[in-house]
Protein backbone atom coordinates (compact mmCIF):
# COMPACT_ATOMS: atom_id res chain seq x y z
CA UNK A 1 0.00 0.00 0.00
CA UNK A 2 1.45 3.35 -1.05
CA UNK A 3 1.14 6.51 1.01
CA UNK A 4 -1.39 7.92 -1.48
CA UNK A 5 -3.46 4.75 -1.26
CA UNK A 6 -3.34 4.93 2.53
CA UNK A 7 -4.58 8.51 2.58
CA UNK A 8 -7.27 7.67 0.03
CA UNK A 9 -8.49 4.80 2.18
CA UNK A 10 -8.83 7.09 5.17
CA UNK A 11 -11.08 9.33 3.08
CA UNK A 12 -13.31 6.43 2.03
CA UNK A 13 -15.72 5.17 4.67
CA UNK A 14 -17.19 2.28 2.65
CA UNK A 15 -14.66 -0.53 2.78
CA UNK A 16 -14.35 -4.06 4.05
CA UNK A 17 -10.65 -4.62 3.41
CA UNK A 18 -9.16 -2.08 5.81
CA UNK A 19 -8.79 -1.88 9.59
CA UNK A 20 -6.98 0.75 11.68
CA UNK A 21 -5.67 0.40 15.22
CA UNK A 22 -3.95 3.05 17.34
CA UNK A 23 -1.51 0.56 18.98
CA UNK A 24 -0.04 3.29 21.17
CA UNK A 25 0.76 0.83 23.95
CA UNK A 26 1.59 -2.09 21.64
CA UNK A 27 -0.52 -4.59 19.73
CA UNK A 28 -4.20 -4.55 20.84
CA UNK A 29 -5.79 -7.90 21.70
CA UNK A 30 -8.33 -7.72 18.86
CA UNK A 31 -5.51 -7.69 16.29
CA UNK A 32 -5.80 -11.45 15.92
CA UNK A 33 -9.56 -11.28 15.37
CA UNK A 34 -8.89 -9.07 12.35
CA UNK A 35 -6.14 -11.36 11.04
CA UNK A 36 -8.56 -14.31 11.26
CA UNK A 37 -11.40 -12.31 9.63
CA UNK A 38 -9.28 -11.14 6.69
CA UNK A 39 -7.90 -14.66 6.16
CA UNK A 40 -11.39 -16.16 6.11
CA UNK A 41 -13.12 -13.54 3.97
CA UNK A 42 -11.43 -11.51 1.23
CA UNK A 43 -8.10 -10.40 2.66
CA UNK A 44 -7.31 -6.85 3.76
CA UNK A 45 -4.94 -4.25 5.15
CA UNK A 46 -4.28 -3.89 8.89
CA UNK A 47 -2.78 -0.53 9.87
CA UNK A 48 -1.17 0.44 13.18
CA UNK A 49 -0.67 4.03 14.27
CA UNK A 50 -4.07 5.39 13.27
CA UNK A 51 -6.92 6.15 15.67
CA UNK A 52 -10.56 6.13 14.64
CA UNK A 53 -13.19 8.26 16.36
CA UNK A 54 -16.54 7.61 14.71
CA UNK A 55 -16.05 8.69 11.10
CA UNK A 56 -12.88 10.62 11.82
CA UNK A 57 -9.35 9.22 11.50
CA UNK A 58 -6.29 10.61 13.23
CA UNK A 59 -2.76 9.62 12.27
CA UNK A 60 -1.06 9.31 15.66
CA UNK A 61 1.97 7.29 14.66
CA UNK A 62 3.69 4.60 16.72
CA UNK A 63 5.96 5.17 19.71
CA UNK A 64 8.05 2.11 18.87
CA UNK A 65 7.26 0.90 15.32
CA UNK A 66 10.11 -1.63 15.29
CA UNK A 67 8.69 -3.42 18.36
CA UNK A 68 5.14 -3.44 16.96
CA UNK A 69 6.43 -4.91 13.71
CA UNK A 70 8.47 -7.62 15.45
CA UNK A 71 5.66 -8.50 17.88
CA UNK A 72 3.19 -8.85 15.01
CA UNK A 73 5.44 -10.99 12.80
CA UNK A 74 6.74 -13.14 15.66
CA UNK A 75 3.20 -13.92 16.82
CA UNK A 76 2.11 -14.79 13.28
CA UNK A 77 5.00 -17.25 13.02
CA UNK A 78 4.76 -18.61 16.57
CA UNK A 79 2.02 -21.17 15.93
CA UNK A 80 -0.75 -19.05 17.45
CA UNK A 81 -2.79 -19.70 14.30
CA UNK A 82 -3.79 -23.15 13.05
CA UNK A 83 -2.20 -22.44 9.65
CA UNK A 84 0.61 -20.17 8.53
CA UNK A 85 -0.63 -16.69 7.65
CA UNK A 86 1.61 -14.99 5.06
CA UNK A 87 1.72 -11.19 5.18
CA UNK A 88 3.15 -8.27 3.25
CA UNK A 89 4.19 -5.18 5.15
CA UNK A 90 5.00 -1.55 4.47
CA UNK A 91 6.17 1.37 6.60
CA UNK A 92 4.99 4.92 5.90
CA UNK A 93 6.30 8.15 7.36
CA UNK A 94 3.62 10.82 7.29
CA UNK A 95 5.21 13.97 8.55
CA UNK A 96 7.10 12.92 11.67
CA UNK A 97 4.76 10.00 12.38
CA UNK A 98 5.25 6.35 11.42
CA UNK A 99 2.43 4.06 10.34
CA UNK A 100 2.80 0.29 9.76
CA UNK A 101 0.64 -1.51 7.19
CA UNK A 102 0.28 -5.31 6.96
CA UNK A 103 -1.62 -7.03 4.17
CA UNK A 104 -3.30 -10.30 5.18
CA UNK A 105 -4.41 -12.33 2.10
CA UNK A 106 -7.43 -14.61 1.95
CA UNK A 107 -6.37 -18.14 2.87
CA UNK A 108 -6.88 -21.34 0.91
CA UNK A 109 -6.93 -23.26 4.20
CA UNK A 110 -10.04 -21.80 5.82
CA UNK A 111 -11.12 -21.71 8.58
CA UNK A 112 -8.18 -19.73 9.95
CA UNK A 113 -8.35 -19.25 13.72
CA UNK A 114 -6.09 -18.53 16.69
CA UNK A 115 -5.72 -20.74 19.77
CA UNK A 116 -8.98 -22.67 19.20
CA UNK A 117 -11.70 -23.18 16.56
CA UNK A 118 -14.11 -20.92 18.44
CA UNK A 119 -11.77 -18.02 17.66
CA UNK A 120 -12.74 -18.07 13.99
CA UNK A 121 -13.79 -14.67 12.68
CA UNK A 122 -15.20 -13.33 9.42
CA UNK A 123 -15.48 -9.82 8.00
CA UNK A 124 -18.92 -8.24 7.76
CA UNK A 125 -18.86 -4.69 6.45
CA UNK A 126 -16.06 -2.97 8.39
CA UNK A 127 -16.27 -5.15 11.51
CA UNK A 128 -14.93 -8.53 12.65
CA UNK A 129 -17.58 -11.02 13.76
CA UNK A 130 -17.23 -14.44 15.33
CA UNK A 131 -18.16 -17.10 12.78
CA UNK A 132 -21.18 -19.29 13.44
CA UNK A 133 -21.00 -23.09 13.31
CA UNK A 134 -22.74 -23.04 9.92
CA UNK A 135 -20.20 -20.56 8.57
CA UNK A 136 -17.29 -22.65 9.88
CA UNK A 137 -18.82 -25.76 8.29
CA UNK A 138 -19.00 -23.90 4.96
CA UNK A 139 -15.28 -23.10 5.21
CA UNK A 140 -14.45 -26.77 5.77
CA UNK A 141 -16.51 -27.67 2.69
CA UNK A 142 -14.58 -25.10 0.68
CA UNK A 143 -11.42 -27.09 1.42
CA UNK A 144 -12.94 -29.78 -0.82
CA UNK A 145 -13.94 -27.26 -3.52
CA UNK A 146 -14.39 -29.04 -6.83
CA UNK A 147 -14.38 -32.56 -5.37
CA UNK A 148 -17.32 -33.04 -2.98
CA UNK A 149 -20.06 -33.79 -5.53
CA UNK A 150 -17.64 -36.07 -7.40
CA UNK A 151 -17.63 -38.44 -4.41
CA UNK A 152 -19.84 -41.54 -4.27
CA UNK A 153 -23.23 -41.27 -2.60
CA UNK A 154 -23.45 -44.18 -0.11
CA UNK A 155 -26.13 -46.84 -0.59
CA UNK A 156 -27.13 -45.69 -4.06
CA UNK A 157 -27.30 -47.49 -7.38
CA UNK A 158 -28.54 -47.07 -10.92
CA UNK A 159 -32.02 -47.86 -9.59
CA UNK A 160 -32.02 -44.44 -7.87
CA UNK A 161 -32.00 -42.64 -11.23
CA UNK A 162 -35.24 -41.17 -12.57
CA UNK A 163 -35.74 -43.05 -15.82
CA UNK A 164 -37.79 -40.31 -17.53
CA UNK A 165 -35.19 -37.66 -16.72
CA UNK A 166 -32.40 -39.88 -18.03
CA UNK A 167 -34.27 -40.52 -21.29
CA UNK A 168 -35.00 -36.79 -21.74
CA UNK A 169 -31.37 -35.94 -21.07
CA UNK A 170 -30.12 -38.42 -23.69
CA UNK A 171 -32.71 -37.19 -26.23
CA UNK A 172 -31.66 -33.60 -25.62
CA UNK A 173 -27.99 -34.48 -26.11
CA UNK A 174 -28.77 -36.27 -29.38
CA UNK A 175 -30.59 -33.17 -30.65
CA UNK A 176 -28.26 -30.38 -29.58
CA UNK A 177 -24.88 -32.13 -29.48
CA UNK A 178 -25.29 -34.91 -32.05
CA UNK A 179 -21.58 -35.39 -32.75
CA UNK A 180 -20.47 -36.09 -29.18
CA UNK A 181 -19.27 -39.66 -28.62
CA UNK A 182 -21.57 -40.30 -25.64
CA UNK A 183 -24.52 -40.66 -28.02
CA UNK A 184 -23.06 -43.94 -29.31
CA UNK A 185 -22.85 -45.66 -25.92
CA UNK A 186 -25.40 -48.01 -24.44
CA UNK A 187 -27.00 -46.91 -21.19
CA UNK A 188 -24.53 -48.51 -18.78
CA UNK A 189 -21.48 -47.21 -20.63
CA UNK A 190 -23.11 -43.80 -20.99
CA UNK A 191 -23.64 -43.54 -17.23
CA UNK A 192 -20.12 -44.77 -16.46
CA UNK A 193 -18.32 -42.55 -18.98
CA UNK A 194 -20.07 -39.46 -17.61
CA UNK A 195 -19.42 -40.63 -14.03
CA UNK A 196 -23.09 -40.54 -13.19
CA UNK A 197 -22.42 -44.06 -11.98
CA UNK A 198 -19.06 -45.16 -10.59
CA UNK A 199 -18.33 -48.59 -9.16
CA UNK A 200 -22.06 -49.39 -9.27
CA UNK A 201 -22.90 -46.35 -7.08
CA UNK A 202 -24.12 -42.91 -8.06
CA UNK A 203 -21.88 -39.95 -7.59
CA UNK A 204 -23.47 -37.10 -5.67
CA UNK A 205 -23.45 -35.17 -8.96
CA UNK A 206 -25.27 -37.95 -10.80
CA UNK A 207 -27.80 -38.29 -7.98
CA UNK A 208 -28.53 -34.56 -7.87
CA UNK A 209 -28.70 -34.17 -11.63
CA UNK A 210 -30.81 -37.18 -12.67
CA UNK A 211 -31.86 -38.93 -9.46
CA UNK A 212 -35.30 -39.70 -8.06
CA UNK A 213 -36.46 -37.11 -5.59
CA UNK A 214 -36.98 -39.62 -2.76
CA UNK A 215 -33.42 -40.90 -3.26
CA UNK A 216 -31.96 -37.37 -3.33
CA UNK A 217 -33.75 -36.45 -0.11
CA UNK A 218 -32.05 -39.30 1.75
CA UNK A 219 -28.79 -37.38 1.28
CA UNK A 220 -30.14 -33.81 0.90
CA UNK A 221 -33.29 -33.65 3.09
CA UNK A 222 -34.20 -30.08 2.08
CA UNK A 223 -33.45 -30.45 -1.63
CA UNK A 224 -35.15 -27.80 -3.74
CA UNK A 225 -34.56 -24.86 -6.04
CA UNK A 226 -36.85 -22.01 -5.03
CA UNK A 227 -38.39 -19.62 -7.57
CA UNK A 228 -40.77 -16.94 -6.35
CA UNK A 229 -42.50 -14.06 -8.11
CA UNK A 230 -42.86 -11.09 -5.76
CA UNK A 231 -45.18 -8.13 -6.52
CA UNK A 232 -42.78 -5.34 -5.58
CA UNK A 233 -39.28 -3.99 -6.10
CA UNK A 234 -38.25 -5.28 -2.64
CA UNK A 235 -39.64 -7.64 -0.02
CA UNK A 236 -40.74 -4.68 2.14
CA UNK A 237 -42.82 -2.94 -0.53
CA UNK A 238 -44.45 -6.14 -1.83
CA UNK A 239 -48.22 -6.32 -1.38
CA UNK A 240 -47.97 -10.04 -0.55
CA UNK A 241 -45.17 -12.54 0.05
CA UNK A 242 -45.38 -13.92 -3.48
CA UNK A 243 -47.84 -14.48 -6.31
CA UNK A 244 -46.17 -17.62 -7.64
CA UNK A 245 -43.89 -20.27 -6.15
CA UNK A 246 -42.34 -23.12 -8.10
CA UNK A 247 -43.51 -26.64 -7.31
CA UNK A 248 -41.11 -29.41 -6.28
CA UNK A 249 -39.37 -31.32 -9.09
CA UNK A 250 -37.40 -34.55 -9.28
CA UNK A 251 -33.83 -33.33 -9.83
CA UNK A 252 -31.62 -30.55 -11.20
CA UNK A 253 -32.37 -31.47 -14.80
CA UNK A 254 -36.11 -31.06 -14.23
CA UNK A 255 -35.61 -27.93 -12.14
CA UNK A 256 -33.60 -26.32 -14.94
CA UNK A 257 -36.49 -26.55 -17.42
CA UNK A 258 -39.12 -25.54 -14.88
CA UNK A 259 -37.15 -22.44 -13.88
CA UNK A 260 -36.25 -21.54 -17.46
CA UNK A 261 -39.85 -21.73 -18.64
CA UNK A 262 -40.84 -19.26 -15.93
CA UNK A 263 -37.87 -16.94 -16.42
CA UNK A 264 -38.22 -16.61 -20.18
CA UNK A 265 -41.62 -14.98 -19.69
CA UNK A 266 -39.77 -11.99 -18.24
CA UNK A 267 -37.69 -11.18 -21.35
CA UNK A 268 -38.38 -10.64 -25.04
CA UNK A 269 -37.47 -13.63 -27.22
CA UNK A 270 -36.99 -14.26 -30.93
CA UNK A 271 -37.58 -17.56 -32.71
CA UNK A 272 -34.68 -18.85 -34.84
CA UNK A 273 -33.72 -22.06 -36.64
CA UNK A 274 -30.45 -23.65 -35.49
CA UNK A 275 -27.84 -25.25 -37.76
CA UNK A 276 -29.33 -28.61 -36.86
CA UNK A 277 -32.74 -27.47 -38.14
CA UNK A 278 -34.37 -27.18 -34.73
CA UNK A 279 -36.47 -24.23 -33.65
CA UNK A 280 -34.88 -22.23 -30.86
CA UNK A 281 -35.88 -19.10 -28.97
CA UNK A 282 -32.94 -16.73 -28.76
CA UNK A 283 -32.38 -13.16 -27.65
CA UNK A 284 -29.59 -11.44 -25.68
CA UNK A 285 -31.88 -11.24 -22.65
CA UNK A 286 -32.78 -14.92 -22.86
CA UNK A 287 -29.11 -15.90 -23.25
CA UNK A 288 -28.19 -13.91 -20.16
CA UNK A 289 -31.04 -15.45 -18.14
CA UNK A 290 -30.11 -18.97 -19.23
CA UNK A 291 -26.43 -18.44 -18.42
CA UNK A 292 -27.31 -17.07 -14.98
CA UNK A 293 -29.59 -20.04 -14.26
CA UNK A 294 -27.07 -22.67 -15.38
CA UNK A 295 -24.29 -20.84 -13.56
CA UNK A 296 -26.33 -20.98 -10.36
CA UNK A 297 -27.06 -24.71 -10.68
CA UNK A 298 -23.46 -25.61 -11.56
CA UNK A 299 -21.76 -23.71 -8.75
CA UNK A 300 -24.12 -24.13 -5.79
CA UNK A 301 -22.93 -25.64 -2.51
CA UNK A 302 -25.51 -28.42 -2.24
CA UNK A 303 -24.20 -29.48 1.17
CA UNK A 304 -24.97 -26.07 2.71
CA UNK A 305 -28.09 -25.61 4.86
CA UNK A 306 -29.25 -22.87 2.47
CA UNK A 307 -30.46 -23.63 -1.05
CA UNK A 308 -30.44 -21.87 -4.42
CA UNK A 309 -33.21 -19.33 -4.87
CA UNK A 310 -34.54 -17.15 -7.68
CA UNK A 311 -36.72 -14.17 -6.79
CA UNK A 312 -38.47 -12.32 -9.60
CA UNK A 313 -39.31 -8.77 -8.49
CA UNK A 314 -41.17 -6.23 -10.59
CA UNK A 315 -37.94 -4.50 -11.65
CA UNK A 316 -35.23 -7.16 -11.33
CA UNK A 317 -34.43 -10.85 -11.09
CA UNK A 318 -32.23 -12.06 -8.24
CA UNK A 319 -30.24 -15.31 -8.31
CA UNK A 320 -29.03 -16.37 -4.85
CA UNK A 321 -26.55 -19.23 -4.51
CA UNK A 322 -25.07 -20.79 -1.37
CA UNK A 323 -21.31 -21.10 -1.65
CA UNK A 324 -18.62 -18.48 -2.22
CA UNK A 325 -16.32 -18.07 -5.21
CA UNK A 326 -12.95 -19.87 -5.36
CA UNK A 327 -11.19 -16.61 -6.25
CA UNK A 328 -12.13 -12.91 -6.25
CA UNK A 329 -14.76 -12.01 -8.84
CA UNK A 330 -12.41 -9.62 -10.68
CA UNK A 331 -9.78 -12.35 -11.10
CA UNK A 332 -12.31 -14.89 -12.38
CA UNK A 333 -13.61 -12.36 -14.92
CA UNK A 334 -10.21 -11.04 -15.99
CA UNK A 335 -8.65 -14.48 -16.51
CA UNK A 336 -11.84 -16.26 -17.62
CA UNK A 337 -11.02 -19.01 -15.13
CA UNK A 338 -12.94 -22.28 -15.08
CA UNK A 339 -12.96 -23.48 -11.47
CA UNK A 340 -16.36 -25.12 -10.99
CA UNK A 341 -17.46 -26.11 -7.51
CA UNK A 342 -19.22 -29.12 -9.07
CA UNK A 343 -17.20 -30.21 -12.13
CA UNK A 344 -19.33 -33.27 -12.91
CA UNK A 345 -22.55 -31.24 -12.82
CA UNK A 346 -20.86 -28.63 -15.01
CA UNK A 347 -19.86 -31.34 -17.50
CA UNK A 348 -23.41 -32.69 -17.66
CA UNK A 349 -24.65 -29.21 -18.62
CA UNK A 350 -21.81 -28.77 -21.13
CA UNK A 351 -22.56 -32.06 -22.89
CA UNK A 352 -25.99 -30.74 -23.90
CA UNK A 353 -24.65 -27.31 -24.91
CA UNK A 354 -26.22 -25.48 -22.00
CA UNK A 355 -22.82 -24.36 -20.70
CA UNK A 356 -19.36 -23.74 -22.10
CA UNK A 357 -15.93 -25.03 -21.14
CA UNK A 358 -14.42 -21.69 -20.24
CA UNK A 359 -14.98 -19.47 -17.26
CA UNK A 360 -17.83 -18.74 -14.90
CA UNK A 361 -20.06 -17.18 -17.56
CA UNK A 362 -19.90 -13.68 -16.05
CA UNK A 363 -18.82 -12.12 -19.33
CA UNK A 364 -21.63 -13.79 -21.28
CA UNK A 365 -24.19 -12.66 -18.70
CA UNK A 366 -22.92 -9.07 -18.68
CA UNK A 367 -22.51 -8.73 -22.46
CA UNK A 368 -25.93 -10.13 -23.31
CA UNK A 369 -27.79 -8.26 -20.58
CA UNK A 370 -26.12 -4.97 -21.53
CA UNK A 371 -27.14 -5.59 -25.13
CA UNK A 372 -30.67 -6.51 -24.05
CA UNK A 373 -31.62 -3.46 -21.98
CA UNK A 374 -28.44 -1.41 -21.40
CA UNK A 375 -28.12 -2.21 -17.70
CA UNK A 376 -25.24 -3.95 -15.97
CA UNK A 377 -25.64 -6.93 -13.63
CA UNK A 378 -24.99 -6.29 -9.96
CA UNK A 379 -23.13 -8.71 -7.69
CA UNK A 380 -23.21 -9.19 -3.95
CA UNK A 381 -20.37 -11.57 -3.07
CA UNK A 382 -19.68 -12.95 0.39
CA UNK A 383 -17.46 -15.83 1.42
CA UNK A 384 -20.41 -18.24 1.69
CA UNK A 385 -22.93 -16.93 -0.87
CA UNK A 386 -23.27 -15.21 -4.24
CA UNK A 387 -26.11 -12.95 -5.40
CA UNK A 388 -26.58 -11.82 -9.00
CA UNK A 389 -29.17 -9.17 -9.89
CA UNK A 390 -30.42 -8.49 -13.42
CA UNK A 391 -32.57 -5.38 -13.73
CA UNK A 392 -35.54 -5.78 -16.06
CA UNK A 393 -36.59 -2.13 -15.72
CA UNK A 394 -34.42 0.96 -15.67
CA UNK A 395 -35.00 3.82 -13.29
CA UNK A 396 -37.02 6.39 -15.21
CA UNK A 397 -37.58 4.00 -18.13
CA UNK A 398 -39.97 5.32 -20.72
CA UNK A 399 -39.14 8.98 -20.09
CA UNK A 400 -37.65 9.41 -23.56
CA UNK A 401 -37.65 12.83 -25.11
CA UNK A 402 -39.17 13.45 -28.55
CA UNK A 403 -37.75 16.96 -28.78
CA UNK A 404 -35.85 17.73 -32.00
CA UNK A 405 -32.82 19.66 -30.88
CA UNK A 406 -31.08 22.27 -32.94
CA UNK A 407 -27.50 21.81 -34.14
CA UNK A 408 -26.11 24.26 -31.59
CA UNK A 409 -24.17 22.02 -29.22
CA UNK A 410 -23.92 24.80 -26.66
CA UNK A 411 -27.61 24.37 -25.88
CA UNK A 412 -27.31 20.57 -25.97
CA UNK A 413 -24.26 20.73 -23.71
CA UNK A 414 -26.23 22.60 -21.09
CA UNK A 415 -29.03 20.03 -21.20
CA UNK A 416 -26.57 17.17 -20.98
CA UNK A 417 -24.78 18.70 -18.02
CA UNK A 418 -28.07 19.35 -16.27
CA UNK A 419 -29.21 15.73 -16.75
CA UNK A 420 -25.82 14.42 -15.57
CA UNK A 421 -26.39 16.13 -12.22
CA UNK A 422 -29.32 13.80 -11.48
CA UNK A 423 -28.71 10.67 -9.41
CA UNK A 424 -29.43 8.52 -11.26
CA UNK A 425 -29.57 10.22 -14.63
CA UNK A 426 -32.01 9.40 -17.42
CA UNK A 427 -29.70 7.33 -19.65
CA UNK A 428 -32.21 7.24 -22.53
CA UNK A 429 -32.44 11.02 -22.61
CA UNK A 430 -28.67 11.48 -22.52
CA UNK A 431 -28.09 9.07 -25.41
CA UNK A 432 -30.85 10.73 -27.43
CA UNK A 433 -29.31 14.17 -26.85
CA UNK A 434 -25.89 12.89 -27.86
CA UNK A 435 -27.12 10.97 -30.93
CA UNK A 436 -29.15 13.87 -32.34
CA UNK A 437 -26.18 16.23 -31.97
CA UNK A 438 -23.28 13.91 -32.70
CA UNK A 439 -21.49 16.01 -35.34
CA UNK A 440 -21.58 19.11 -33.12
CA UNK A 441 -20.42 16.94 -30.20
CA UNK A 442 -17.30 15.99 -32.18
CA UNK A 443 -16.63 19.63 -32.96
CA UNK A 444 -16.95 20.42 -29.26
CA UNK A 445 -14.38 17.70 -28.50
CA UNK A 446 -11.95 19.07 -31.08
CA UNK A 447 -12.20 22.65 -29.81
CA UNK A 448 -12.01 21.85 -26.11
CA UNK A 449 -9.51 18.98 -26.01
CA UNK A 450 -7.25 19.68 -28.99
CA UNK A 451 -7.98 16.26 -30.52
CA UNK A 452 -6.95 15.90 -34.15
CA UNK A 453 -9.40 14.82 -36.85
CA UNK A 454 -7.62 11.46 -37.20
CA UNK A 455 -7.78 10.83 -33.47
CA UNK A 456 -11.39 11.97 -33.46
CA UNK A 457 -12.34 9.40 -36.10
CA UNK A 458 -10.36 6.69 -34.29
CA UNK A 459 -11.95 7.39 -30.92
CA UNK A 460 -15.46 8.52 -31.84
CA UNK A 461 -16.08 7.14 -35.34
CA UNK A 462 -18.07 8.76 -38.12
CA UNK A 463 -21.46 8.15 -36.54
CA UNK A 464 -22.84 7.77 -33.04
CA UNK A 465 -23.72 4.16 -33.86
CA UNK A 466 -20.02 3.42 -34.48
CA UNK A 467 -19.23 4.60 -30.97
CA UNK A 468 -22.08 2.57 -29.50
CA UNK A 469 -20.79 -0.61 -31.19
CA UNK A 470 -17.60 -0.32 -29.18
CA UNK A 471 -19.17 0.82 -25.91
CA UNK A 472 -22.49 0.40 -24.16
CA UNK A 473 -24.69 3.39 -23.41
CA UNK A 474 -23.46 3.55 -19.81
CA UNK A 475 -19.80 3.71 -20.87
CA UNK A 476 -20.77 6.58 -23.17
CA UNK A 477 -22.41 8.37 -20.25
CA UNK A 478 -19.23 7.87 -18.20
CA UNK A 479 -17.29 9.41 -21.08
CA UNK A 480 -19.59 12.44 -20.97
CA UNK A 481 -19.11 12.71 -17.21
CA UNK A 482 -15.34 12.84 -17.75
CA UNK A 483 -15.73 15.44 -20.49
CA UNK A 484 -17.88 17.72 -18.34
CA UNK A 485 -16.23 16.93 -14.99
CA UNK A 486 -12.59 15.85 -15.21
CA UNK A 487 -12.48 15.29 -11.42
CA UNK A 488 -15.33 12.73 -11.41
CA UNK A 489 -14.77 9.80 -9.02
CA UNK A 490 -15.99 6.22 -9.40
CA UNK A 491 -18.38 6.68 -6.47
CA UNK A 492 -19.90 9.85 -7.97
CA UNK A 493 -20.19 8.29 -11.44
CA UNK A 494 -21.83 5.16 -10.00
CA UNK A 495 -24.63 7.24 -8.44
CA UNK A 496 -25.31 9.09 -11.70
CA UNK A 497 -25.29 6.00 -13.92
CA UNK A 498 -27.01 3.76 -11.38
CA UNK A 499 -24.48 0.93 -11.13
CA UNK A 500 -21.95 -0.25 -8.54
CA UNK A 501 -18.54 1.35 -7.91
CA UNK A 502 -16.87 -1.83 -9.18
CA UNK A 503 -18.81 -1.67 -12.44
CA UNK A 504 -17.64 1.92 -12.93
CA UNK A 505 -14.04 0.80 -12.40
CA UNK A 506 -14.62 -1.75 -15.18
CA UNK A 507 -15.90 1.02 -17.46
CA UNK A 508 -12.84 3.16 -16.66
CA UNK A 509 -10.60 0.22 -17.56
CA UNK A 510 -12.40 -0.34 -20.87
CA UNK A 511 -12.15 3.32 -21.85
CA UNK A 512 -8.45 3.33 -20.97
CA UNK A 513 -7.79 0.12 -22.91
CA UNK A 514 -9.34 1.76 -26.00
CA UNK A 515 -6.95 4.73 -25.56
CA UNK A 516 -9.87 7.12 -25.18
CA UNK A 517 -9.04 8.51 -21.74
CA UNK A 518 -6.01 8.87 -19.54
CA UNK A 519 -5.31 9.79 -15.95
CA UNK A 520 -3.21 12.89 -15.37
CA UNK A 521 -1.41 13.10 -12.03
CA UNK A 522 -2.10 11.00 -8.92
CA UNK A 523 -4.60 8.16 -9.02
CA UNK A 524 -5.97 9.25 -5.66
CA UNK A 525 -5.21 12.92 -4.88
CA UNK A 526 -4.93 15.88 -7.22
CA UNK A 527 -5.24 13.85 -10.43
CA UNK A 528 -7.93 14.12 -13.09
CA UNK A 529 -9.26 12.42 -16.22
CA UNK A 530 -8.88 13.75 -19.75
CA UNK A 531 -9.35 12.57 -23.33
CA UNK A 532 -6.27 11.21 -25.07
CA UNK A 533 -4.98 13.40 -27.88
CA UNK A 534 -3.19 10.70 -29.86
Image (cartoon, rainbow, N blue to C red):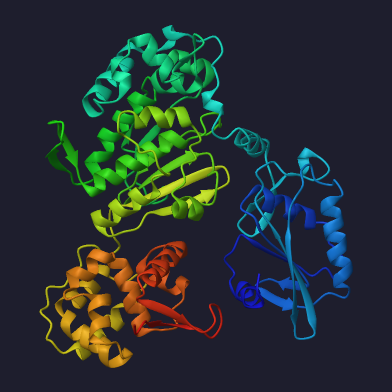
> Which residue is rendered at x = 25% and y = 48% of the image?
285
Horizontally, residue 475 falls left or right of residue 82, namely left
- Residue 145, quarter of picture: top right
| Quadrant of the drawing holding the N terminus | bottom right
Most foreground residue, 10 or 327: 327
Q: How many discs appear?
A: 0
> Which residue is rendered at x = 25% and y = 56% of the image?
371
> Which residue is rendered at x = 68% and y = 50% of the image?
39
Most foreground residue, 365 or 120: 365
Instruction: Return the x and y of residue 272 as percentages of the image width and height.
Output: 13, 40
48 is higher (above) or lower (below) than 343: below
| Quadrant of the drawing holding the C terminus | bottom left
Instruction: Return the x and y of residue 61 as percentages of the image width and height.
Output: 80, 77
Most foreground residue, 390 or 65: 65
**Residue 25 seen in the current view:** no
Instruction: Return the x and y of residue 265 as percentages of the image width and height.
Output: 22, 40
Horizontally, residue 63 falls left or right of residue 383, namely right
282 is higher (above) or lower (below) than 256: below
Instruction: Return the x and y of residue 2 as percentages of the image width and height.
Output: 65, 74
291 is higher (above) or lower (below) than 212: below
**Residue 100 seen in the current view:** yes
- Residue 14, quarter of picture: bottom right
- Residue 257, quarter of picture: top left
> Which residue is rendered at x = 35% and y = 32% of the image?
350
Amino acid sequence: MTKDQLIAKLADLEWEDFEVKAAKGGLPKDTWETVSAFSNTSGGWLLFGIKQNGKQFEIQGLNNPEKVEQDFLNTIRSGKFNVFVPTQQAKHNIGSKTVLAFYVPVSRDKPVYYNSLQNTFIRRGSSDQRATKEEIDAMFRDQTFGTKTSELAPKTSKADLHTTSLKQYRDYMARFNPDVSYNRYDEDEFLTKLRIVDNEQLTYAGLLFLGKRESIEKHFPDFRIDLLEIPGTTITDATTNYTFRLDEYENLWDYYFACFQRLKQKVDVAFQITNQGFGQELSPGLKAIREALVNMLMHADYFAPAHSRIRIFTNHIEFYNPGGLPKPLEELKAKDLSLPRNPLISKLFRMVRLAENAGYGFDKIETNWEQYNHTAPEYDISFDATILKLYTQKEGAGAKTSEKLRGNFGETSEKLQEELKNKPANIDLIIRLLTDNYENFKIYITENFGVSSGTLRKHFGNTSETLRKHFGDKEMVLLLLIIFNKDITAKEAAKVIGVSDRTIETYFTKLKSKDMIERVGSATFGGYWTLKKD
